[in-house]
Image (cartoon, helix red, strand yellow):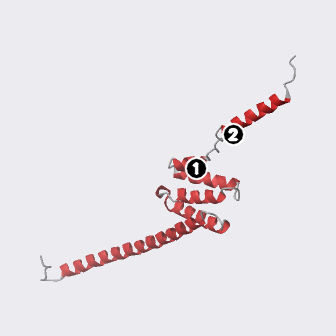
């Protein structure tokens, strides 16, 4: 049987272990799945992962960040109008639920851009309909003009 170590050896060992532990780099926090998917540009899967994260902890730490990145992921063009709706909803929730969030100003800008994009899309749709109507009217006028006896359009 070994004799117990003197107290100063135990203290020295504990100090050495503490010093070594403080020199070691801290263990990095695991990167959430949603962030991994976002970094890989898998936006549809990332949006779903952020939504699950928010469903699990709607007011948990990082919920404002999850809402912000949900909006960014859902804004991807491949997600279409449903994605745009989800993005705007996430931005509105962030602004309403987390008024002191560091993401709020960016969310307000993105939401304003989303609204402007919606306005421009509606305006473009109206202009396309007007152009189609004008084309139909022009074709009708051409027919009327060609049906007039004795008159030919200039060449």
- Count of residue discs: 2
Residue extending farthest top: 1
Quarter of the picture containing the N terminus is top right
Residue placed under numbered mark 2 in the picture: 22
- In the depicted view, which residue is nearer to us: 67 or 49? 67
Residue 152 as seen in the image, left or right of residue 140? left
What whole-number distance in Å separates the C-alpha atoms at marks 1 and 2?
A: 29 Å
Residue 81 percent location from the top left of the image: 50, 62
The image shows residue 98, relative to residue 19, as above or below, that is: below
- Identify the residue at horizontal 47%, vertical 55% (top origin): 78
- Identify the residue at horizontal 61%, vertical 46% (top origin): 31
Label 2 secondary element = helix
Residue placed under numbered mark 1 in the picture: 35
Crowd band around label 2 with a 10 angstrom C-alpha radius: few (<14), some (14–19), many (20+): few
Image marks 1 and 2: residues in contact by CB distance under 8 Å: no
What label sits on residue 7 in the rendered view? none
Residue 51 percent location from the top left of the image: 63, 55
Residue 41 as seen in the image, left or right of residue 90? left
Question: Within the image, what quadrant is residue 125 found in?
Answer: bottom left
Choose mark 1 or mark 2, whichever is in front. Answer: 2
Residue 73 percent location from the top left of the image: 54, 56
- In the depicted view, which residue is nearer to us: 19 or 135? 19
- Identify the residue at horizontal 48%, vertical 72% (top origin): 116
Quarter of the picture containing the C terminus is bottom left
Crowd band around label 1 with a 10 angstrom C-alpha radius: few (<14), some (14–19), many (20+): some
Q: Earlier in the sequence, mark 1 or mark 2?
A: 2
The image shows residue 130, relative to residue 48, as above or below, that is: below
């Amino acid at each position: 049987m070994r004799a117990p170590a003197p107290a100063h050896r135990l203290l020295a060992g504990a100090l050495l272990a503490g010093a070594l532990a403080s020199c070691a780099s801290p263990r990095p926090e695991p990167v959430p799945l949603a962030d991994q998917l976002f970094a890989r540009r898998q936006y549809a899967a990332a949006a779903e992962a952020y939504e699950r994260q928010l469903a699990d902890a709607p007011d948990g730490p990082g919920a404002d960040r999850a809402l912000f990145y949900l909006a960014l992921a859902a804004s991807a063009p491949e997600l279409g109008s449903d994605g745009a709706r989800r993005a705007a909803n996430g931005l509105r929730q962030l602004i309403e639920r987390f008024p002191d969030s560091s993401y709020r100003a960016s969310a307000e800008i993105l939401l304003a851009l989303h609204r402007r994009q919606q306005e421009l899309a509606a305006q473009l749709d109206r202009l396309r309909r007007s152009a189609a109507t004008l084309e139909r009217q022009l074709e009708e006028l051409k027919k009327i003009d060609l049906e007039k006896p004795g008159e030919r359009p200039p060449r």
